[in-house]
């Protein structure tokens, strides 16, 4: 019977020491300031990367893909049935891309939300 009492006390003592050691460590990490990177560029509407739908003319997939790669844009997805490339790009790159005759139009990917939001 005395042995069970010792186990019970040891359990509470070990829990106490775990809390004593862990809680201050958790609070010390909370107060550590986050250092900012020095090479982060300021994000504006002009240089922010967005997803765009790039609609190209029928039969112009190769040319449209070559143009997208020429301007160093990232192709995210392709919808071949609709002749659409989905790309990540900034506004300046899209303005250059639109000037080509193979590209019918470019539009910003619509933001979709659930009805409950």
Image (tube, rainbow, N blue to C red):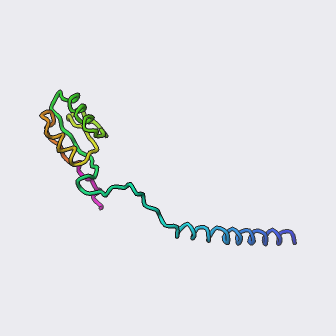
Residue 87, position as x, y percentages in the image: 27, 41
Q: Position of residue 100 (x, y in %)?
A: 14, 36
Quadrant where the C terminus is found in the figure: bottom left
Asked whether 83 or 61 is in front, the reply is 61
In this rendering, would 83 be left or right of 28?
left
* Magenta stretch: helix, strand or loop mostly: loop
In magenta stretch: residue 116:
yes
The residue under the point 29% across, 61% down is 116
Along the horizontal axis of the image, is 34 left or right of 87? right
Question: Most extreme residue toward the front, as rendered?
Answer: 38
Q: Residue at x 23, y 28 (%)?
A: 62
Q: For residue 56, which quarter of the picture?
A: top left
**Residue found at x 82% / y 72%:** 5
Q: How many marks?
A: 0
Residue in the image at 23% along x and 45% along y? 52
**Percent coordinates x, y for residue 76 in the rendering:** 31, 40
Residue 28 locus on image (x, y percent):
57, 69
The correct choice, above or below, for 80 with respect to 45 in the image is above
Please tell me which residue lies in front, 78 or 115: 78
Is 50 a magenta residue? no
Which quadrant of the figure contains the N terminus?
Answer: bottom right
**What are the residue bounds of the magenta stretch?**
109-117
Outermost residue to the right: 2
Position of 30 with respect to 117 (left or right) is: right
Nearer the observer, 117 or 85: 85
User: Compared with residue 3, is residue 61 higher up or lower down, i.e. above or below?
Assistant: above
């Amino acid at each position: 019977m005395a042995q069970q009492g010792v186990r019970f006390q040891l359990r509470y003592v070990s829990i106490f020491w775990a809390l004593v050691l862990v809680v201050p460590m958790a609070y010390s990490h909370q107060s550590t300031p986050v250092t900012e990177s020095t090479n982060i560029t300021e994000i504006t509407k002009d240089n922010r990367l967005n997803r765009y739908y790039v609609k190209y003319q029928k039969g112009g997939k190769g040319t449209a893909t070559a143009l997208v790669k020429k301007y160093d844009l990232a192709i995210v997805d392709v919808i071949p049935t609709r002749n659409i490339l989905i790309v990540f790009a900034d506004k300046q790159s899209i303005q250059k891309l639109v000037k080509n005759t193979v590209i019918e139009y470019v539009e910003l990917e619509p933001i979709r939300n659930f009805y409950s939001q």
